[in-house]
């Protein structure tokens, strides 16, 4: 039987057909190699490899792959991957590789196969598939730097502003009412900046944590703990808890961020001097399922309704504009957290006269 290769070369007549079409149209760089004494020798490459790595097929064919694409300091890593391939294991790893234009980051997948005398002249080999992650990795690093610098500077400067404004308010006590109002407005804005920095940190932790780990948690102790915290921070608020049903749900300790954010919003965005908040845990029905499958954590208030455009941005991906973005990160934090656990966030009207924001999570 003739020998088939990625580029469609054959040592005789053979129908490379679908095999050739598939590999040539894969956007990832693919190398087919033979293992000779444990070393990958290039048999063929697809066009994506030529485009990404900058080496022509005729130039690299028959050459040791590692000598062309592996930096010297990564050779031990590459040899370990080759040893795994030779033993029949499939490899997955993020790697740094050399191209004609410099170093780039890739997701490497090594897929082995065993040859036969009839099909591959008795040679063992495999495929090396490289997905270019260079721009993804660079953007991740840039965002990491931006996140750290922004949150650090935002928090520090907000602390400075809040601290000095508090001192100013103390000195202005009983003096010019307009000046005092201005200082109080500055103080509130500074505290809001502090809260934004804190919420940004929570969002980062939610997104970075693995989401494929099977875990469960009983939300009742968490809800009661959050409520106690807010009763201490806002003694004028009337916060009630009602538990009609509970039990383990598919979530982990990050669920606290979502609950805390909703209770905080219910208090902070209520102009009343004595805001009312009610937190309930109960069974919930979601379309296509029964109430026994889901648990709802509802946070109700008697404050102003959340504007429809803010709800739309959070729930249906409406375009974010300077006037259509939401007033903070709290609802984003809640939505991202709930989404992480495969749950659902919804908005409604409360019997208290304000908002009814529900987190629905599947029972474990």
Image (cartoon, helix red, strand yellow):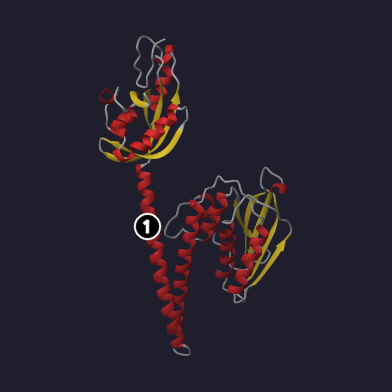
Residue at (42%, 59%) from the top-left corner? 322
Q: Relative to the observer, which residue lies in front, 120 or 327?
A: 120
Q: Relative to the observer, which residue lies in front, 39 or 119?
A: 39
**Residue 301 seen by the camera:** no
Residue at (59%, 47%) from the top-left corner? 342
User: Could you tell whether 138 is left or right of 241 in the image?
Assistant: left
Residue 230: image location, x then y, percent: 60, 70
Residue 75: image location, x then y, percent: 33, 36
Q: Which residue lies furthest to the right in this view?
A: 244
Q: Quadrant of residue 63?
A: top left
Residue 112: image location, x then y, percent: 44, 26
Q: Residue furthest bottom?
A: 174
The correct choice, above or below, for 94 with respect to 299 in the image is: above
- Number of residues whose C-alpha sits closer than 10 Å to that of mark 1, classed few (under 14), some (14–19) or many (20 or more): few
User: Could you tell whether 238 is left or right of 161 in the image?
Assistant: right
The correct choice, above or below, for 184 with respect to 14 in the image is: below
Q: In which quarter of the image is residue 55?
A: top left
User: Could you tell whether 49 is left or right of 248 in the image?
Assistant: left
Residue at (44%, 88%) from the top-left corner? 171
Residue at (31%, 34%) from the top-left corner? 69
Q: Relative to the observer, which residue lies in front, 222 or 343?
A: 222
The correct choice, above or below, for 282 with respect to 232 in the image is: above
Q: In which quarter of the image is the N terminus?
A: top left
Q: What element carries label 1?
A: helix
**Residue 220 seen by the camera:** yes
The correct choice, above or below, for 161 with respect to 208 in the image is: below
Q: Count up the numbered dots.
A: 1
Residue 114: image location, x then y, percent: 45, 20
Per the image, the residue denoted by label 1 is 146
Q: Which residue lies furthest to the front in this view?
A: 37
């Amino acid at each position: 039987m003739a020998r088939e290769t990625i580029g469609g070369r054959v040592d005789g007549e053979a129908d490379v057909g679908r095999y050739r079409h598939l590999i040539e149209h894969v956007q990832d760089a693919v190398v087919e190699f033979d293992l000779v004494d444990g070393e990958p020798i290039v048999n063929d490459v697809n066009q994506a490899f030529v485009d990404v790595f900058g080496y022509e097929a005729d130039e690299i064919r028959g050459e040791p792959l590692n000598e062309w694409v592996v930096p010297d300091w990564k050779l031990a890593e590459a040899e370990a991957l080759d040893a795994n391939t030779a033993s029949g294991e499939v490899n997955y790893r993020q790697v740094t590789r050399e191209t004609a234009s410099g170093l780039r980051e890739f997701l490497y997948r090594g897929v082995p196969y065993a040859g036969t005398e009839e099909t591959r002249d008795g040679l063992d080999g495999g495929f090396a598939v490289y997905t270019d992650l260079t721009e993804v990795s660079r953007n991740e690093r840039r965002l990491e730097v931006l996140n750290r610098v922004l949150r650090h500077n935002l928090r520090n400067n907000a602390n400075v502003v809040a601290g000095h404004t508090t001192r100013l308010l103390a000195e202005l006590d009983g003096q010019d009412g307009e000046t005092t109002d201005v200082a109080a407005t500055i103080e509130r804005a500074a505290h809001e900046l502090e809260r934004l920095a804190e919420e940004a940190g929570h969002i980062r932790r939610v997104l970075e944590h693995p989401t494929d780990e099977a875990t469960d948690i009983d939300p009742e102790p968490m809800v009661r703990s959050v409520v106690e915290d807010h009763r201490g921070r806002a003694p004028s608020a009337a916060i009630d808890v009602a538990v009609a049903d509970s039990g383990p749900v598919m979530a982990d300790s990050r669920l606290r961020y979502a609950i805390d954010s909703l209770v905080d919003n219910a208090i902070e965005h209520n102009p009343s001097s004595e805001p009312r908040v009610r937190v309930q845990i109960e069974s919930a029905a979601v379309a296509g399922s029964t109430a026994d499958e889901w648990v709802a954590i509802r946070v109700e208030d008697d404050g102003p309704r959340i504007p429809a455009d803010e709800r739309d941005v959070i729930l249906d991906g409406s375009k974010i504009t300077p006037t259509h973005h939401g007033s903070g990160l709290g609802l984003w934090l809640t939505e991202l957290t709930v989404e992480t656990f495969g749950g659902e966030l919804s908005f409604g009207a409360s019997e208290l006269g304000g908002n009814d924001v529900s987190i629905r999570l599947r029972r474990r």
